[in-house]
Amino acid sequence: MYACEEWGVDQADNYVDRLEAGMKRLIDHPSLGANYDHVFSGYRKLQVEHHAVFYRLLESEVLVVRVLHELMDAPERLLE
């Protein structure tokens, strides 16, 4: 993992913990992220630090589709 090599295991673990905390907030606040319908119908985007969490709201759950670094081409990556 890039973060481990660049900043060390402890810092990488801390960052992953913050990403997970952001995603867990979606359990109680599923509409927290911005509407991303203008790019992909039914998608929402939650920014957490330097990453974007792309997700969809299903009937009884939140489905995380991808977690991408903010510098990545999200529309292209979401098509993969």
Image: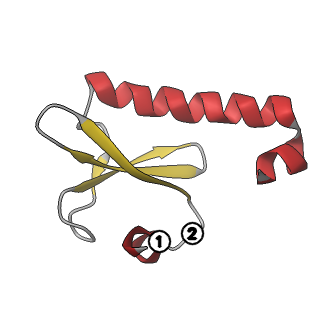
* Rendered residue at 10%/37% (across/down): 59
Q: Residue at the far bottom: name it.
A: 76
Q: Which of marks 2 and 1 is nearer the N terminus?
A: 2
Instruction: Sort mark 1 into few (<14), some (14-19) or many (20+) by Cα contacts within 10 Å.
Output: few
- The percent coordinates of residue 24 (x first, y second) are 41, 26
Q: State whether residue 22 is above or below residue 49.
A: above
Judge from the rendering whether residue 62 lies leftward or rightward of residue 23; answer left or right: left
Number of numbered callouts drawn: 2
Instruction: Sort mark 2 into few (<14), some (14-19) or many (20+) by Cα contacts within 10 Å.
Output: few
- The percent coordinates of residue 45 (x first, y second) are 36, 51
Q: Name the residue under label 1.
A: 77
Say which of 56 and 46 sits in front. Answer: 56
* Rendered residue at 29%/36% (across/down): 32
Assess whether mark 1 and mark 2 are in contact (beta carbons under 8 angstroms): yes
* Rendered residue at 43%/73% (across/down): 80
Residue 13 lies in what quarter of the image? top right
Q: Residue at the far top: name it.
A: 28
**Regarding mark 1 in the picture, which secondary structure is present there?**
helix
**Regarding mark 2 in the picture, which secondary structure is present there?**
loop
**C-alpha span from label 2 to label 1:** 8 Å
Residue 41 marker: none
Q: Name the residue under label 2.
A: 72
Q: Residue at the far left: name it.
A: 59
- The percent coordinates of residue 37 (x first, y second) are 21, 63
Residue type, label 1: Arg
Q: Which of marks 2 and 1 is in front?
A: 1
Q: State whether residue 55 is above or below residue 73.
A: above
* Rendered residue at 30%/25% (across/down): 27
Residue 64 lies in what quarter of the image? top left
**Colour mapping:** secondary structure
Q: State whether residue 37 is above or below residue 35.
A: below
Residue type, label 2: Met
